[in-house]
Every structure is written in structure tokens, then in C-alpha cells.
Amino acid sequence: MLFLVISSPNPQKPSEVKDQRRKYWPWAQDKLDKGLASSFYARTGRGAVAIFDVDSNEILHSLLNEWSEIVPAKFDIYPLLDSEAIKSFLGS
């Protein structure tokens, strides 16, 4: 199951969370290495965007809890269909 996740970190001065933010990218790389995500991007200004590829909502929930422990944030979550799935659905 593919999910686009957009984070909006809690409002704090960037200098106050710099050490925590440094922990985020190794965490993200671990998820890429394990095949739980296909990409991560920093957003201009604040926040990040990720595409997770997980087998269940429970796994996604666990990942978002881990993420929140590093950088507390609000998450917007969008379930996605890959191009082959939508073509099949449309009968193409």
C-alpha cells in the first residue's frame, strides 16, 4: 500500500530542534534500506514528504509514531494507487 505523507512540524525555532532534526535523515535512510519507503524529501522552509510502501495501516501508524518521536508534527496522509493499479481499475 502506497501512502504520501506530508509533515508539518510543530512550531518551534529551528535552532531549538536542530539536534533532533539530525536524527531524522538516518531514520529515513533506514526505512529506505528496509523497503518501507521509496522516497523522502525535505520541504522548503519546514517539514518533509515521504512515500511509504507498507503492507498495512498498522505499519504506517508505527512509522508515523517513530517519526513523531524524532520531530513532532502534524501529518497529512494520502493513499496512492500506482499507475498499473489504476490502469487495471480503469480497464486499460
Image (spheres, rainbow, N blue to C red):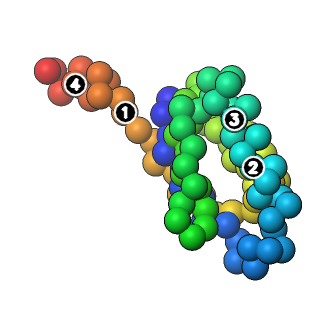
The amino acid pointed to by label 4 is: Lys
Label 4, label 2: how far apart the Cα atoms are: 35 Å
Of the residues tagged 4 and 3, which is closer to the observer? 3
Instruction: Identify residue for label 1.
Output: 81
- What residue is drawn where x is 67% and y is 66%? 9
The amino acid pointed to by label 1 is: Leu
Image quadrant in which you'd find residue 12 = bottom right
Label 3, label 1: how far apart the Cα atoms are: 23 Å
Instruction: Identify residue for label 3.
Output: 29
Helix, strand or loop for disc 1: loop
Q: Are dots 4 and 2 in contact, CB under 8 Å?
A: no
Rendering coords of residue 25 (x, y %):
72, 45
Q: Residues within 10 Å of mark 4 (few under 14, many from 20)?
A: few
Rendering coords of residue 37 (x, y %):
59, 33
Helix, strand or loop for disc 4: helix
Q: Nearer the viewer, residue 87 or 14?
A: 14
Label 3, label 2: how far apart the Cα atoms are: 9 Å
Report the quarter where the C terminus lies.
top left
Sequence-wise first label, 3 or 2:
2
Q: Residues within 10 Å of mark 1 (few under 14, many from 20)?
A: few
Q: In the rendered image, is residue 49 in sight? A: yes
Image quadrant in which you'd find residue 85 = top left
Instruction: Identify residue for label 2.
Output: 24
Q: Is residue 11 above or below residue 60?
A: below
